Image (spheres, rainbow, N blue to C red):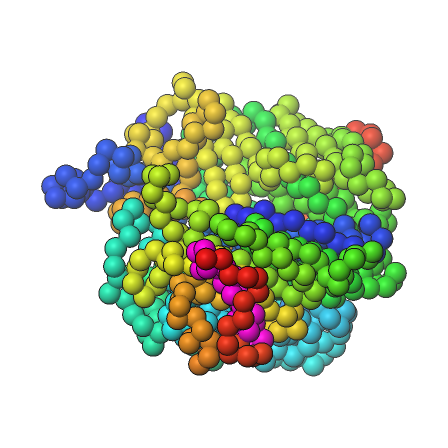
Amino acid sequence: MTTPPANNSVSPLPHPTRREFIAQSAGALSAMAILPTLAAASPAPAAAPDGKAISVGLIGAGRQGRAILAELATMDNVQVSAICDVEASRRENAAKRVSGAAAYASHAELLEKAKDVSAIIIATPTHEHAKIAVDALSAGKHVYCEMPMAHTLADCRAIAKAAASAKSIFHAGLEGRSNPVYKLAWSFFQSDAARAFIAAEAQHFQKTSWRFPGSSPEKEKAANWRLDPELSLGLVGELGVHQLDVVLWYVNQAPTLVSGHGSIRLHDDGRTVPDTVLANFGFKSGADFSYRASLANSFGGRFELLRGSNAAVKLAWTHGWMFKESDAPTQGWEVYANRQQFFRDEGITLIADATKLAAQGKLKEGVGLPHTSVYYALSDFFNAIAAGKPSPCDALTGLRATSLVITANQALLKREAMTIDPATLAL
Amino acid sequence: MGTRFELILLDRPETHLRAVADEIIAEIHRLHGRFSRFESTSIVSQINRDGTGRAVCVDQGAFDLFALAESVRVASRGAFDVCVGHFMHSEHVSPSSRGSADAGPLTLNAAARRVALSSPAQIDLGALAKGFALDVALAILIEHDIPAALIHAGTSSVLARGVPSGATVPGWPIAVRSSYEPLPLVLRDEMLSVSAPRGRSLSTDPERPVSHIIDPRTGQPAAAVDTAATIFPITHPRAGALADAWSTAAIVLADELQDCLSHNPPARGTFHIHRHSRGWRTLAPHAAPELSPLVPQHA
C-alpha cells in the first residue's frame, strides 16, 4: 500500500454496531467511504484579532460584486460597511442589499472616508484593478482581488510589488485553491493515486453574448470592456485564468510554450475579441494542457480534467470525480466509495468531509459543496486576516497565472507559438 | 427552477435586446443557484441543512423573499406555505397535524437577517421562485428602457410589459387553459400566474393522478379548483412573486378564497378561478368583494 503524502490523513470509519449494520442495506453500505479528512467544508471566517467583525469595503458592484455581497451576508464575523461603484444605479442597488453600508463613487473617496474598513474586495473590471489595489495596499488595507489580476504584465508587477512590501494581506481570488473538493482532489493527484502527469484539459462553454447593455453610448462602452481588444484578455484571460491556475497548482510546474487561435463563431456583431478560443500550453516534460472556451455553445459547461497514469481527476467547481485506471493499485477504500456513471466510465465522487458525513450516514448528501466557490476563497482571505498569516493564494500566485494568460491571449490573437519567459512569472 | 423561460423583447436594436436578454438570463441562473433546493450551494439548501439547529444569516434580497412568503402564508390562513414541499415528495400523502396560519415552521429575524426552521420542515420556494425571477427581469427591463416585452416561465408565470408595436389589442393577448374552456386575457404591465392541480402528479399511477398542490393545513391534495389565475399590476412591488404565491393559495383555499380575500386582500390583485364545470369566476378584492362571472357559466 502506498503511504499518502504527509498532508493527507486517512481516518477509518468507526466500526458500526450490530444494530446499525443490520439496518443498513447493501446500497447504504456502498455509501461508506474511507477518504482523507479535510478541514470542515463550511469554514466560517474567524473574527479579527480584536474579536470584532472584519469591516469590509467592496469596490465594484457589478455582477460579480453583487454575488460577493450575497456570500458576505451569510458570513458571521464580516461586516460590509462601504460600497463603491462609479455607476450610481449599481452603487445604489448594492447599498440596498446591505443595511448600514456607506456608498462611494470612487475608491479614493472610500479609502479616504471609510477609515474603519480594514479589508477591501476589488470586483471592478480587470483593467482597473492595479490602481485600486496599489492604493488600498498603500493605505494599509488587506486586499482581495478578483482574477485576472490585471490586463498587462506591468500592472500585475505593480500589484505584486505593492503586496510584497505591504504589511497587510493580499489574496488573489483564484477560487480553485480554496475549494474543498479541489483541495481533496489535489491530495490524490499528489499521491500515487494519479502518478505521472500525462495531460490536462479544461473548458468553459457557455452560450451567451458577453455583451452588457448600457443606457448611453459611454456607459455601454464602459460596460463592455470585455469586448474591447485594448482592455480585454478575452476568454482565455477572463475565464481561463482560474482553470489554468488549477493545473499549475496540481502539476507544480509552469508551461514553457503556448500557442492557439481564436475566432468569431457566432456573435458576429462587430466585435473583434474572439468568442471561441483554443490555447495549448506545453510543459518541459512533454505534457500539455489544452484550454477551450466559447460563447457559442454550452455543452459540457465548465470543468478541468487532469490525467495521470493511474487515474484522471475531473473537477467541475462544486463537484469532482476520480477515474481510476483498471491497473491502478487500490487502497481499499475505493470499494465503499460513492460512484457516478458517465457512459462507460465510472467516477468516484470526491466529497469533502466524507468521513464525517459517512459516520453520520449522510454521505450521499455530501455530493456537491454546501457553499459557492467564491465563499471559500473569501473565507480563506478573512481567516488569513484573523490569523495574521499570509494568504494561501498570494500576489505571486496571481501574477504567475495572470502573466501566463496574458501571453496566451497574445499568442492566440497572433496565431503564433510563443515561448514563455520564466522571468515573467516572478518578481 | 428547472423551468424553461422564454423571452420576447421588442422595439429596440437587436444587439441591445440580446444584451438585455443575456443579462436577464444570467440573473435567472443566479437566482436558481441562490434559491433552488436542488443546488447544494443555494441558500435554501443551507437553511434546510443547517436551519434547524441554528438560524442562518442571509442577504437582504433573500430575507425579503422569505418575508414575502411568510406574509402570504399568514394572509392565506396557512393555505400557502413554502415549507409544504416535503409532503410532495412522500410516496404516501397523509394527513398532517401541522398548523394553522398562526404558527409556521419558518422563523424570521429581520434585524439580524436570519432564517431558522423548525424540524422537520424543509423549504421549497418552487411556488414563488418563477414569479420572483420575473420581478428581477422586470427591474432589468425598466433599467434598460425596454418598452415592450413578454417573458414567461414554464407557461405558468408571465410578465407582460407594455404593448407590442402594431398590436390590435391594448396589450399582450394571452389565453389561460383550463380543463374546460380557456380564459382570454389581454395583459399590459401585469404579472400573471396560473396554477392547476393537473399536469404534475404525486402518484406514479397515470390512471389515478394525485394533485401536486398540497393543502399545508391538512397534508391532503387540493383538487376542488381546476385552475386559478392571479394577476397583479407590475407597479406593485414583487408582483410576480405575489401572483405566484396567491395562485397556489387560491387552488388550496377554493371556496374559502372569497372570505379570505375580504379579510386580508393582497393589494390590487385579480383572481380568476375555474371550479370544475362551473365556469370562470373573477374576484377583484380591491374593486368589489362580490363575484363576477367573466364568461357565462356552464351547467
Q: Position of residue A135 (x, y in %)?
A: 73, 68
Q: Position of residue A15 (x, y in %)?
A: 18, 42
Q: Is residue A114 above or below residue B135?
A: below
Residue B209 appears left or right of A420? left
Residue B298 appears left or right of B165? left
What's drawn in magenta, residue-wise?
B265-284
Magenta residue check for B272: yes
Q: Residue at x 36, y 29 (%)?
A: A2
Q: Residue at x 68, y 51 (%)?
A: B7
Q: Position of residue A227 (x, y in %)?
A: 81, 49
Q: Residue at x 22, y 36 (%)?
A: A25
Residue extending farthest to the left is: A18
**Picture quarter containing residue A202?**
top right
Say whether residue B14 is visible: yes
Q: Residue at x 76, y 50 (%)?
A: B18
Magenta residue check for B16: no
Between B291 and A186, the residue placed more toward the observer is B291
**Picture quarter containing residue B270?**
bottom right
